[in-house]
Amino acid sequence: MADTDISNTISTAAAWDLIHAYQQLRDKGIVSDNELADIEHFSPATISRIPEKTLVKIWQQLVRAHPSPEIGLIIGTTITSEAKGVLASWVSQSEDLREALSIFREHIALMNPSENWKVEDIGQSVVLTLTIVSRERYPVAAIERSMSALVSWARMLTSHPIPIERATFCHSPPEYIDKYYEIFGHHLSFEAQQCQLVFASDLLNLKVVSSNHYLREVMAKTARLQLEAMSSTRSLHSQVAAIITNSLHDGQLPNIEAVAKQLHISRQTLYRKLDKEQTTFQIIVDDTRKQLATEQLSQAVPPTITELSYNLGFKETSSLYKAFRRWFGMTPKAFLIQRHSK
C-alpha cells in the first residue's frame, strides 16, 4: 500500500469486528458484493490497513442487510483481542484514564485519521466531542460504534462503570433507543449539533488496571515508529489538512508557522514541499474550511451562522459570507435550504 495516501486508510485491527460481521453475512448468503469480494482475505495478521472507502462500503452493507439494526452498538461494545491494534495496546498500558484518553486522542491516526475526539475538562465534568472529517459519508451506525466503543473501552480499562452524565447525538432517535440506555444512560439528546459524552471529571484519575510502565514505553516506541512510517507515505497536503482540522476543532485556526512547527520543519521547507505537491497552505486552509462547512450544515441540527463562523476560524461572519459565495455561489442560508431540500 505504499502508493496509497495513508490518510485514506483505516487500521484493519480497528475495523476487524466490522469486517467479521460482514463476513458472517456473506457466509450465510445474506449479502453478495463483487466490489468487496477480497474482504475474506482481510485480517490484522495479513493486512495492516484497508482503504477508508472499503470500510464505508462495509458499513453500508451491514446497515442494509444485518438483522440487528443496532449493529453499530453491538460492534462498539464488543472488545476482542483481534481488534486490539497498536493504539489500543498502547492505551491499555496507560497509568490512568486521563493519560489513556490523551494517547488515544493525539494518536488516533493510527486507527482512523478521519475520526477526531476533543477532550475538555470543564471543572466538575469532562466533555468528549466526536467529529468525523472525511469525504466519505459514514452512516449513523459508524457513529454509534465510535461512541459506544469509547465508553466500553473506558469501562474495561478501569473496571469502573463510568456513569455517563449526558450524551448527545446529531442523528434522530432510533427505534432501539433502549439499547442506548444500557450504554449511555437515560440523559440523552438527539438531533444535536455535536456528538458528545459527558462524565464526572474526577473519573479521569481512575487507574488503568492493565497499566505497565515498561510495556507502555515499548508500545509507545512501536506506535511512533508506525506513525513515522505512515507519515513517509502520507502526502504533506494530508498532514497539513489534518493539523488544520484538529486545530479548528479546538477553536483555533493555526498559521503556517504553527503547522510547520508541528511537522518539525521550517516554514520555508513547508512552502517548498507544498509547492512540489502543486498546492499552497492557503489553498489547504480554504479546502478544509469548505469541507467542514459542508459537513456541519448537513447535520440534522446545523450550527447558526455565528457558530459556523467560529467553528471555521473566521473572525467575522462577513468573511464567512464571502467564502460561501466563492465556494458555492450562494449565501450560507441558501446553501442550507438547498442541502436540506434534497
Image (cartoon, helix red, strand yellow):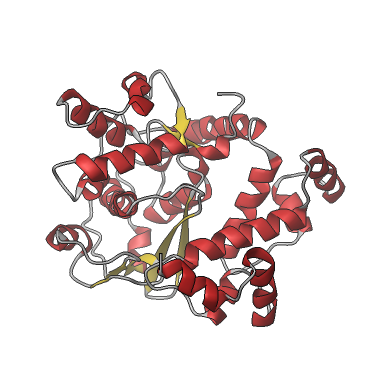
Residue at 53% across / 38% down in the picture?
8
User: In terms of depth relative to the viewer, which is nearer, 139 or 225?
Assistant: 139
Tell me the quarter of the image containing the C terminus. Answer: bottom left
Identify which residue, 143 or 300, lies in the foreground: 300
The correct choice, above or below, for 132 with respect to 270 in the image is below
Residue found at x 55% / y 65%: 293
Residue 213 shows up from this direction: no
The image shows residue 323 at horizontal and vertical percentages of 68, 70
Left or right of 77, for residue 298: right
Q: Position of residue 7 (x, y in %)?
A: 56, 40
Task: Answer with the quarter of the image where residue 299 lies.
Answer: bottom left
- Image point (64%, 44%), residue name: 238
In the rendered view, tell whether residue 221 sits above or below residue 147.
Answer: above
Q: Quadrant of residue 187?
A: bottom left
Depicted 65 relative to depicted 140: above or below:
above
Q: Above or below — where is 318 with respect to 328?
A: below
Of the 4 image quadrants, the one containing the N terminus is: top right
Left or right, residue 317 beside residue 161: right
**Count of marks overlaid on the render:** 0
Horizontal side of 92 relative to 297 (left or right) equals left
Q: Tell me where residue 295 appears, x and y as whole percent.
A: 49, 61
Residue at image point 15% right, 45% down:
68
Q: Is residue 330 visible?
A: yes
Q: Position of residue 29 (x, y in %)?
A: 17, 26
Describe residue 269's horizontal placement relative to residue 46 as left or right: right
Instruction: Using the image as rendered, state which of residue 116 and residue 161 is in the foreground.
Output: 116
